[in-house]
Amino acid sequence: MPTRDSSRTRSQLVYEQMKADIFAARLAPGERLKFPDICERYKTSVGAAREALMHLKLERLVASQPNQGGQGYAVVE
């Protein structure tokens, strides 16, 4: 049975990958982040992407932006 430390959730993995991409400038400041693009890029579900974005928002690495018909996010400049 895996230990708790070695078993990360999908949203944690996406969060770590997105954070690394922000610091490596693979996600540029001001770039709009759309759920379909995130899900395709990181091979994940909308739920995992949403949770990862919420963690990045708490760290002030992304900011929520009003979007037509839903919530959008952008990398903080």
Image (cartoon, helix red, strand yellow):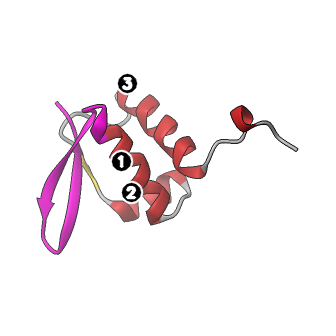
- The kind of residue tagged 1 is Leu
Q: Is residue 69 above or below residue 13?
A: below
Give the percent coordinates (x, y) of residue 58.
Answer: 29, 37
**Residue designated by label 3:** 23
Residue range (magenta): 57-77
Closer-to-camera residue (9/36): 9
Q: Secondary structure at mark 1?
A: helix
Image quarter (top left, top right, bottom left or bottom right) of the C terminus: top left
| Image quadrant in which you'd find residue 46 | bottom left
Query: How far apart are the alpha carbons under marks 2 and 1?
Result: 5 Å
- The kind of residue tagged 3 is Phe
Q: Determine crowd level at label 2: few under 14, some 14-19, many 20+ residues with C-alpha closer than 10 A.
A: some
Count numbered badges in the picture.
3
- The kind of residue tagged 2 is Arg
Q: Determine crowd level at label 1: few under 14, some 14-19, many 20+ residues with C-alpha closer than 10 A.
A: many
Residue 73 magenta-highlighted: yes
- The reply to whether the C-beta atoms of the residues labelled 1 and 3 are less than 8 Å apart is no
Apparent side of residue 54 relative to residue 16 in the rendered image (left or right) = left
- The reply to whether the C-beta atoms of the residues labelled 2 and 1 are less than 8 Å apart is yes
Give the percent coordinates (x, y) of residue 76.
Answer: 20, 34
Farthest residue in the bottom direction? Answer: 69
Q: Is residue 75 above or below residue 25?
A: below
**Residue at image point 13% right, 71% down:** 68
| Image quadrant in which you'd find residue 13 | top right
Q: Is residue 23 above or below residue 60?
A: above
Residue 62 magenta-highlighted: yes
Q: Which mark is residue 53?
A: 1
**Residue at image point 20% right, 69% down:** 70
Q: Secondary structure at mark 3?
A: helix
**Residue designated by label 2:** 50
